[in-house]
Image (cartoon, rainbow, N blue to C red):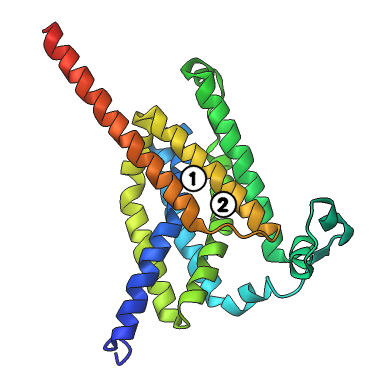
Amino acid sequence: MDLLATPAFWVSLSALTFLEIVLGIDNLLFVSIAVGKLKGKQQAAARRVGVWGAMVLRIVMLSGIFWIIQLDASPLLQLPESWAGLIGITEGHAVHEFTAFTVKDLILLGGGLFLLVKGTQEIHASVEGAAHEEAEAKSEFSAVLVQLAVINIVFSLDSVITAVGMTDILVVMILAVVLSTLVMAIAAKPLADFIEEQPTMKMLALAFILLVGVALVADGAGFHIPRGYLYFAIAFSIVVELLNIRARSRHESLAKQKSA
């Protein structure tokens, strides 16, 4: 109760909750894309598993935070340092970052490659058109759950490490994760419906997934790309596309009025 009465608690909780919501956008977009090929009750069930599973996983990770931190402590795989010179990396710290891979690095690399493959496959299916999509077999429910589990592990690791960097109060971390998950749960279905109704927005979401995949691979290889750049790029693209959607809707309304 004494903790709740301190302004620092509420400031930390507000800031971390907002940050967790922002970090959860890429997770939410992937959930929306992954469950899009399921139908009816399976789609709703998979969406719940994706959103609430992420919350449970992050809380479990937070409870074992000291173990999570150790994932980045010592290299699990060491490449020859001469490999770094092949791509022009010569500085000592940069060479070490590129050639020494911890468990965290390998998880980020695997998750990034997974997103790149998944995003490319979805873009290919979208470009091929509706006829191709109907000819393709629908995703199995179990396969979608496996995809959600894999990506939840990757995004949760990033989220938990960010939470640790923001505050050292475990209660604040857990509350921020729960509150951000509630926001994601509320936004999940409207976002999925909107992406399905607007093909161009779906393409933007897939492009964002590819960007996140590249960022994760870069992080795993020792080259950190500030997420702010990615979020600004996709936010700018979304605003432009919303203006295009508004313009198309207005033109269609005027065309209907003229034809009537």
Tell me which amino acid carries mark 1: Phe
Left or right of 208? Residue 81 is right
Query: Split into 4 quadrants, where in the image is the C terminus?
Result: top left
Q: Which residue is mark 2?
A: 151
- For image coordinates 82% across by 57% down, the residue present is 84
- For image coordinates 80% across by 62% down, the residue present is 90
Left or right of 41? Residue 87 is right
Depth check, front residue: 202 or 233: 233
Is residue 46 at all visible to an observer of this figure? no
Depth check, front residue: 250 or 157: 250
Where residue 138 appears, as percent x and y from the top left, is 53, 28
Image quarter of residue 41: top left
Query: Split into 4 quadrants, where in the image is the N terminus?
Result: bottom left
> Can you tell which mark lies on residue 30?
1
Image quarter of residue 193: top left
**Most extreme residue toward the top, as rendered?**
259
Reading the chain from its start, which is encountered first: label 2 or label 1?
A: 1
Where residue 101 appears, as percent x and y from the top left, is 76, 63
Helix, strand or loop status at disc 2? helix
Q: Are marks 2 and 1 in contact (CB under 8 Å)?
A: yes
- For image coordinates 29% across by 34% down, the residue present is 243
Tell me which amino acid carries mark 2: Ile
Q: Is residue 64 above or below residue 139?
A: below
Q: CA distance from mark 2 to mark 1?
A: 8 Å
Q: Is residue 193 above or below residue 28?
A: above
